[in-house]
Structures are given as C-alpha cells and as structure tokens.
Image (cartoon, grey):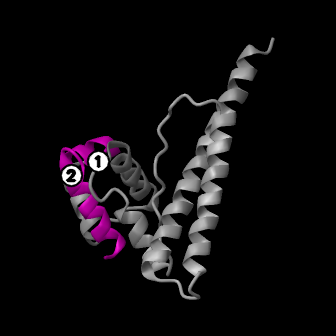
C-alpha cells in the first residue's frame, strides 16, 4: 500500500469521512478527493498527511496508523504502535517503578527468545510488545516529570 492509498483508507474511516476531514483541513471535499487521488495539479503535502493521521489517531478511527505504516514500509522499516498509558494519577515514583518493571519484562522476553538460540516470530512479537510497554511507561514518566516541572513553575514567585 502506498501513502496515498493509506491516506484514502484513513480518510474513509474517519467519522464523517472525506467531508469531515476536508472541513477540518480547510479544503473542499473535491480538492481533498483530487489530492488523495494524485490528480494532476493536486498534491497532498506531508503537513496535511500528518495532520490527517493525527486527527484519525485522536478519535481512534480504524487504520489510524496506515500512513505511518506505509511510509515506514517504503523506507524498509516498520512502526510499532505504543500502547497509550492510562492516566491513573500515579505519582512519579510509582511511574518510575513501573518503568523499571517494564524494563525487566523486556529483558525476560529477550532471554526467553534467545533460550533456544533461535528467535521465532512469536518471540519477536513478544519482545516488541514488551518494548512498546516499556516505551509507554517511559512516556508516562516523562509526562509526569514535565507536569511536575510546570507545576513548580506556576508555584514559583
């Protein structure tokens, strides 16, 4: 799937479809249709593509990561979606502790994958899943530290 195919799929899956996306991007539905079709004289730029991807991710529409996946595949790599951590109100120390636990889970998954000297597809998926959970935990820590910093700035005289 190329990037325009991916974007068409995303736009069609967005609540309200092409009309809603066009309205949010300040375009007419016809212009957006031509851009998505790659019609001569019409080009959908990377800024619009990323904005559409963000819109789809924000509402959790189907295929919200299709553009990122298409670009990654074109570049010979892949994208692993990060699980979104629930904001449980956990304090910074609890979040940091969860991050350390997730790091240990990655190490365990790697050790298990290497136990027989061969990494299977299931082993790879498990390591990727654990790594994504570690990334989500790290993001949670960073968000909490940033929030604490902003709170300290607001409290400073």
Q: Is residue 1 left or right of residue 125?
A: left
Q: Nearer the viewer, residue 19 or 97?
A: 97
**Any part of residue 41 in sight:** no
Disc 1 target residue: 27
Helix, strand or loop: magenta stretch: helix
User: Image point 71% across, 17% down: which residue?
Assistant: 154
| Badge 1: residue crowd in 10 Å (few <14, some 14–19, many ≥20) | some
User: Image point 24% across, 50% down: which residue?
Assistant: 14
Q: Position of residue 127 (x, y in %)?
A: 53, 69
User: Image point 60% across, 54% down: which residue?
Assistant: 102
Indicate the quadrant where residue 40 lies.
Answer: bottom left
Secondary structure found at label 2: helix
Q: In this view, does 2 lie above or below 42?
A: below
Q: In this view, does 4 lie above or below 148?
A: below
**Any part of residue 147 in sight:** yes
Query: Which numbered circle lies on residue 130?
Result: none
Q: Which of 68 and 40 is in front in this view?
A: 68
Q: In this view, does 55 lie to the left or right of 119?
A: left
Q: Position of residue 105 (x, y in %)?
A: 59, 59
């Amino acid at each position: 799937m190329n990037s325009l195919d991916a974007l068409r799929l995303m736009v069609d899956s967005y609540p309200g479809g092409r009309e809603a996306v066009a309205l949010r991007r300040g375009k007419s539905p016809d212009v957006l249709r031509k851009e998505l079709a790659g019609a001569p004289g019409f080009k959908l730029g990377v800024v619009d593509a990323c904005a559409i991807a963000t819109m789809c991710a924000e509402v959790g529409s189907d295929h919200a990561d299709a553009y990122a996946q298409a670009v990654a595949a074109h570049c010979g790599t892949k994208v692993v979606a990060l699980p979104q951590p629930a904001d449980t109100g956990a304090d910074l120390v609890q979040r940091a502790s969860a991050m350390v636990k997730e790091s240990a889970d990655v190490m365990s998954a790697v050790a298990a994958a290497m136990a027989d000297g061969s990494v299977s597809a299931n082993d790879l998926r498990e390591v990727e899943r654990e790594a994504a959970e570690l990334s989500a935990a790290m993001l949670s820590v960073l968000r909490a530290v940033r929030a604490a910093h902003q709170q300290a700035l607001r409290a400073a005289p």
